[in-house]
Amino acid sequence: MSIAFVLGTRPELIKTAPVMHELARRGEPFEIVHTGQHYTSSLDGTFFRELDLPPPRINLRIGSLPPAHQVAAMLAGLADTFTAAKPDAIVVQGDTNSVLAGALAAHKLGIPVAHLEAGLRSDDWTMPEEGNRVLAGRLAAVHFCPTVLQRERLRAEGIVRGVYVVGNTVVDACLALAQRATVSSTVRSTVDIEKEPFALVTLHRASNVDTAPRLEQLLDALVSFSRSLALKLVFPVHPRTRDKIRAFHLESQLARPEFRILEPVGYRDMLALMRHATLVLTDSGGAQEEACILHVPCVTLRPNTERPETVTVGANVLCESTDPAQLLEAARSVMARPRHWPNPFGDGRTSARVVDVLTGTNTRWQPSGHA
Ligand code: UD1
Ligand code: UDP
């Protein structure tokens, strides 16, 4: 079976890499179809090199467009690519616009879709990713759920066939590199991760960075927080956030001494930073999972999460508020807990289970995932 991985962004590269490595190990053919949603080298090329991924069969170079135009352009480009390449199946991962376009293009051409990280739900329809997840779930024939929670969410939506609880490939990715992760000289020249206590910050959700008042209040709250706990804020800034900071004239906020500002870092650097951080402050999905896996307390700067397991095991606390006192309270509560919560996302062998299913070792492909 020839499998095409349709992907476009940093987390999709990180989380599909272990599956591709497992296919390669078994001598199974696959190829990458890149939408070009992410194109800046620190979000894209860095990860191809670091994760040792083969070059894509094609990069559609769609780039940054208004969301509907971006999905439309991807849809057309992917339909042409699938028509020429005739993959037997496609794999998508997560909840980005590339996932929606990939699943929809394949569905239109009658090509079965396997969805990694299926069944996650925030129940927050203001989030662009929620629509992408739900629609990809409707279109997919095979659903790889990280935990039983997602299987139950899919069941509640009438999706019961082709559903596999396999863990999350982020564990495979993270464990493969975490112990060997050493920081690069660039990061080392910015922060002494062994000596200087710090919180690792990432921010890129539309709800946090796309409006000036919210972004400004968040940056202010982070600075107050840093002063209260004498923790520096190591902040690799996502290009979306960098662009918004520039557009809203907030550069002086980042120049404050509490921040150690970095360009987006590679995965080894990220894991090394995380392992040494006192705390993670984030709105990233992947960072919530990795903090949980690496036993680093996490505050998620959102009102909800599609990763509630991280909260249930005690690794993560939600904080939507930009009131410094509430942020401090959230951080103190999670930092006070013993750091030996169980990892809900699996044993690091998720990619082997996924490949068993994809190659039919485990079961046959189902024609439809719906009851
Ligand atoms: C996208 C995903 C989000 C995912 C994130 C991972 C959607 C709706 N959003 O968000 O779910 O968590 O990727 O990082 O699919 N930009 C660059 N260089 C790039 C890419 C983006 O400068 O390589 C800037 C551009 O200003 C662009 C903005 O970032 O307009 C947003 O990019 P986009 O891909 O639309 O969304 P992300 O915020 O990256
Ligand atoms: N990440 C990284 N370098 C950074 C920031 C994040 O390698 O500078 C990794 C992070 O460890 C996680 C993934 O990127 O594996 C998360 O990506 P992002 O936050 O962009 O997307 P999300 O997970 O929210 O969809």
Image: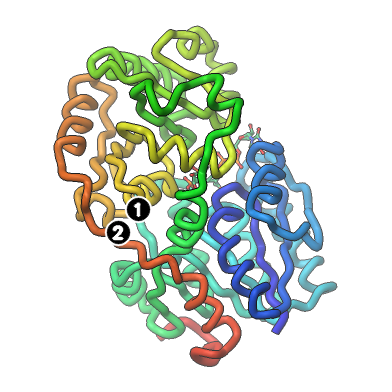
SS category of the residue bearing label 2: loop
Q: Residues within 10 Å of mark 2 (few under 14, many from 20)?
A: some
Q: Is residue 337 above or below residue 238?
A: below
The answer to whether 98 is drawn above or below residue 202 in the figure is: below
Q: Residue at x 65, y 72 (%)?
A: 90
The residue at which mark 1 appears reads as 293
Q: In this orientation, does residue 76 appear? A: no
Front one among 171 and 185 = 185
Q: Residue at x 57, y 89 (%)?
A: 360
Residue projecting furthest to the right: 84
Number of other residues with Cα within 10 Å of mark 1, as a class: few under 14, some 14 to 19, many 20 or more:
many
Closest to the observer: 301 or 67? Answer: 301
Q: Residue at x 58, y 59 (%)?
A: 99
Residue indicated by mark 2: 343
Q: Identify the amino acid type marked 2.
A: Asn
Q: Residue at x 36, y 78 (%)?
A: 158
Q: Is mark 1 within 8 Å of ligand 2?
A: no
**Label 1's element?**
helix
Residue 339 in percent (x, y) is at 22, 46
Q: Which of disc 1 and disc 2 is earlier in sequence? A: 1
User: Decide: marks 2, 1 in contact (CB < 8 A)?
Assistant: yes
Quadrant of ligand 1 in image: top right
Give the amino acid at mark 1: Ile
